[in-house]
Amino acid sequence: MQRSDKDKPVETSAGGEPQKAYRNLDFLESASARSLRILSEYVEPNARFKHYKIDDTIIFFGSARILPRDEAERRLEEARSKGEDLTVAQRNLEMSRYYEDTRELARRLTEWSKSLADDDRRFVVCSGGGPGIMEAANRGASEARGLNIGLNISLPMEQIDNPYISRELNFEFHYFFMRKFWFAYLAKAVVVMPGGFGTLDEFFELLTLVQTGKIRKQMPVVLFGSKYWSEVVNLEALERYGTINAEDLELFFRTDSVDEAFDFITDQLTSYALDIPGPRL
């Protein structure tokens, strides 16, 4: 196999002097240094989480495309004034309820977390760092004046970090699997809002880890939006065809209510997690 120029070692600086390996960007960006780049996406976040005393998180997954209610209303009014087809604008307004529910739930969970008697920060709201549901989660936590986390990912189509993430806990990952490691490793609870392929991927990966015992901690998972999820994924069919067990359907809690989601998560965390410290970073 022919090596690209990126894979050729560069042993000297532009001036011809010897160059320290950790300052050699051509090397660090080469295939030969991939293991170092992967390791850096463990070590650097680990150092920041330790510094800011982040013990564990409440993860929010969901679509990047869901709008805040005021923006959805503005677009509907604009479409109406221009005499355009209202189908998409009306759908966006209907779906905006999940943005507002996420925002409210994240705010309430952050206020609850801040009320706990603990020197470290417990159950910090964490999202994928982008727009839509991710923005709503960070926004709600920010409105409760709580630190919150954004685990962003670099994509061919640029995903811009939302403005509500605590700046000191704003991350950008290159490797999906390292980003997903931090989601799973720190999470003590998960909220899954309506979303697309990425949300399905994250939801099913966590369910698999819980089902197989790779995650041994008690992990309350809220599947929010009964109508949406019943149309998108027929989970009962998996049990009916014998590809999962009936009890696997109890690995998550379905609801359409912010109150129910809040009560379920806080009850579970109070029962199973408050006396157990988060992972020692």
Image (cartoon, helix red, strand yellow):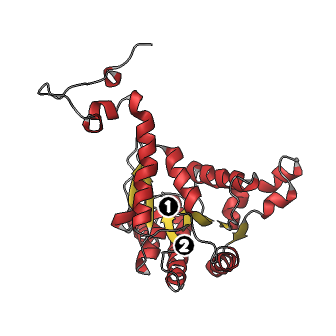
Residue at screen point 55% across, 74% down? 101
Circle 2: element type: loop
Report the residue marked by disc 1.
Answer: 281
Assess disc 1: are there few (<14), some (14-19) or many (≥20) residues with their C-alpha within 10 Å of its C-alpha.
Answer: some
Q: Point out residue 281 in the picture as x, y percentages from the top left corner.
A: 50, 61
Does residue 160 appear left or right of residue 257 in this picture? Answer: left
Q: Quadrant of residue 7?
A: top left
Seen as rendered, the residue at the extreme left is 15
Vertical position of residue 15 compared to residue 96: above or below: above
- Nearer-N-terminus badge (1/2): 2
Q: Is residue 163 visible?
A: no
Vertical position of residue 262 compared to residue 32: above or below: below
Q: Nearer the viewer, residue 220 or 12?
A: 12
Does residue 206 appear left or right of residue 14 in this picture? Answer: right
Q: CA distance from mark 1 to mark 2?
A: 15 Å
Q: Nearer the viewer, residue 48 or 170?
A: 48
Residue at screen point 48% across, 75% down? 121
Picture quarter with the N terminus: top left
Q: Amino acid at mark 1?
A: Leu
Q: Point out residue 116 in the picture as x, y percentages from the top left corner.
A: 54, 84
Q: Is residue 200 visible?
A: yes
Does residue 69 appear left or right of residue 188 in this picture? Answer: left
Q: Quadrant of residue 52?
A: bottom left
**Residue 172, which numbered label?**
none
Query: Disc 1, disc 2: CB below 8 Å?
Result: no
Circle 1: element type: loop
Report the residue marked by disc 2.
Answer: 123
Residue at screen point 62% across, 79% down? 262
Q: Point out residue 146 in the picture as x, y percentages from the top left corner.
A: 43, 77
Which of labels 1 and 2 is toward the front? Answer: 1
